[in-house]
Image: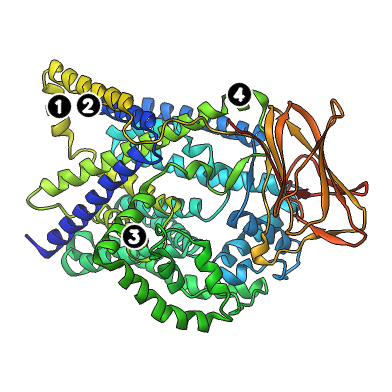
Amino acid sequence: MTKTSKFMKLVLGLLSFSLILGILANLVVPKNLSATCFIIILALVSFFFLPQLRTWTNRLSPEQIQKIIYLSLALILGIQVSILYFMPATVYHDPFRVLSQAEVLSTGDTHWQYSTYFWRYPNNVALTAMLAKWFMFTNLIHLSTNTALHILTLLFLDTFILLSLKFIVEVGKKNSLGITAFFIFSPWAYTYYLQVFYSDLPILCTLLICLIILKKWPTFSKKQRWLNGFILWIAVLFGQLVKPNLIVFAIAVLIVGGTLWLKHRKTHHYLLVPLTVILLGFTLATPLKVQLAHAVNFVPNTRYELPATHWIWMSYDPKGSGMYKGKDVVKMMNLPNKNRRQKYLNHALPQRLETLGPLGLVKRWVQKAAILLNVSDISTAYTSGFIEAPSIYQKIQPFMMQYGNIVMRFCFIFIYGLSLMGCFSLLRMPKIPYEPILNLALISAVGYVAFHTLVWETESRYGQSLLPLLLVVCACTAGLYQPAAARIKNIRFNHLQTAASLGVLLSVIALISGFSWQTPKTQDVIVAAQKSQLSAQYAAKWQEIGPHSVVTQGVNLNHAANYFSVSVLPEAQLEIRLVNLNTNNHYCLKPGSTIFKYRGHLPKGRYQIVLKNRVLKTQPIKTVQTKRYELTPHPLKIDGETWQHTSLLYIAVDKI
């Protein structure tokens, strides 16, 4: 066995282990035995019908499959536009800070003092600068910021879906209908990636575009190679600017390119040019990033900036889980500058590793990999519910949330399973055939898992970078395990029926027994919300109101609620009431340290938040203000004066 084959066997083994861990993580997290049993049943049924689905897919002509894809895309687009129009979500944390500063830059204001966020996390400066250019263009044609963002999310999201389906049809036709069903029926295309524009979605497009162009490169004419080479360069340059962890892909390109140069130059020499173009894109990203920062007048501030080792140190907190930890950030910010933080980390990081010990490290790696590959909370990332969802949806919202969670987990188990079957098929071969694009996808996938497992902090969002890579693996290995599928088809039906029945029976027994798992819980319904803000931790500037000033803002409850809260600053001396404009009933909110809240029945209807300054001095209140981004349909009013694109921070919930 050659060294290349041994290396790829190792890569396949590591990816297989990771995929098995991802399947298990999506089966059991979150802990809800009913959901787990239902997913197991879905998996058994899918396994049973997979050969039949492949056979039926093979009978379809290319024209028929193309019609199915375009009809599916039309259906997906129709649902997406309806969601954006009727049910926009309230966006918070990093994506909101990026769009807020981009709006400021688009007006010609290049000040960065509105928040310390970008001094702490300068990696998002390039994304913000490019988004500002987009806003400048959409401002010229009089589009709102909301519409501009929706166009971007639709453009990136549906481009990714279209390219994925077309590539799978061309390369791995047998899996095309299964992947089409994933995009139609799972919440993946209708939630986070639709409602929030951030760096996660562009990076998926970058990876997929690169792999598709590389796969098709031998079929291109000279003119097409020039065009696609330029697209390749732009995609890599853009991807590295918005998401620095794309460097994992660069390492994979170096490995594949080096192997190709040393051992397969005669047969695959044509790939050396596009691989070089990719590396050129990575090389130029750094100086371009500096130029973008200079163009928007951004100057780094070491008083707030965090060293790279901070993220490693944070991921190995013995009391944490490998994810972002606010207490660690507070500890860093208590130190005066970046150099002092780095000096502290030079001895603090080895201490944490020593505290965990060998077994603790292995446990942490497994824990981080499981979080990375679990998708149960992707749908709600960076959102805090719908601003004002229609009444008809809120009645079924708990069911839709449970449905979405189960289907999302099942779909990724299905994708992980198809990829795992491909890996096992390759592992069984005495000698793995040299396929550079497949190798690039496999090595990149292992690289991303290794990076967020061994080095960086982890989140389920980061694991989404594997999706385009695994889709390529599914497509390129679709024909390898067909003989196995054919053997399954030839097994006597009663044996399959017995196995399926046994699986269902075990699931039912597990459901009845309950183990020590949590019992199913009905989801709370977020009736109305506005949670976008720049945050006090980043020194956000707050609105000030004069003595005895009155602030009002409308809010519609399209469903009954039993909890309502308004965020305030610590030690706020305010009086806050919620007034039902239909009945004129007044509900006084109880003061708290950071929120005023009301617990009790709030019938469906039109309401108004009334906030009053109780003291004879000016005091700040917690609000958020944008340039053109519409936070809610109801602008804030201060002493009767309307403040467009300004809002309080509030949430109404029907707690079940």
Q: Quadrant of residue 384?
A: top right
- Mark 3 burial class by Cα count in 10 Å: few <14, some 14-19, many 20+: many
Q: Quadrant of residue 262?
A: bottom left
Provide residue 217's location: percent of width, then percent of height.
33, 54
Q: Residue at x 45, y 51 (%)?
A: 461
- Mark 1 burial class by Cα count in 10 Å: few <14, some 14-19, many 20+: some
Q: Residue at x 44, y 61 (%)?
A: 236
Query: Which quadrant, please, contains the C terminus?
Result: top right
Query: Would you name the residue on which mark 4 appears?
Result: 395
- For label 3, the SS is helix
Q: Which residue is at the front of the view, 284 or 270?
A: 284
Disc 3 residue type (three-letter):
Thr
Sequence-wise, the earlier of marks 2 and 3 is 2
Query: Would you name the residue on which mark 2 appears?
Result: 51
Sequence-wise, the earlier of marks 4 and 2 is 2
Query: Which quadrant, please, contains the N terminus?
Result: bottom left
Query: Would you name the residue on which mark 1 appears?
Result: 488
CB contact under 8 Å: marks 4 and 3 = no
- For label 1, the SS is helix
Spatial CA span between label 1 and label 3: 36 Å
Q: Quadrant of residue 133?
A: bottom right
Spatial CA span between label 2 and label 1: 8 Å
Spatial CA span between label 4 and label 3: 40 Å
- For label 2, the SS is helix
Residue 453: mark in rendering: 3
Spatial CA span between label 2 and label 3: 35 Å
Disc 1 residue type (three-letter):
Ile
Disc 2 residue type (three-letter):
Pro
CB contact under 8 Å: marks 2 and 1 = yes
Provide residue 614's location: percent of width, then percent of height.
88, 53
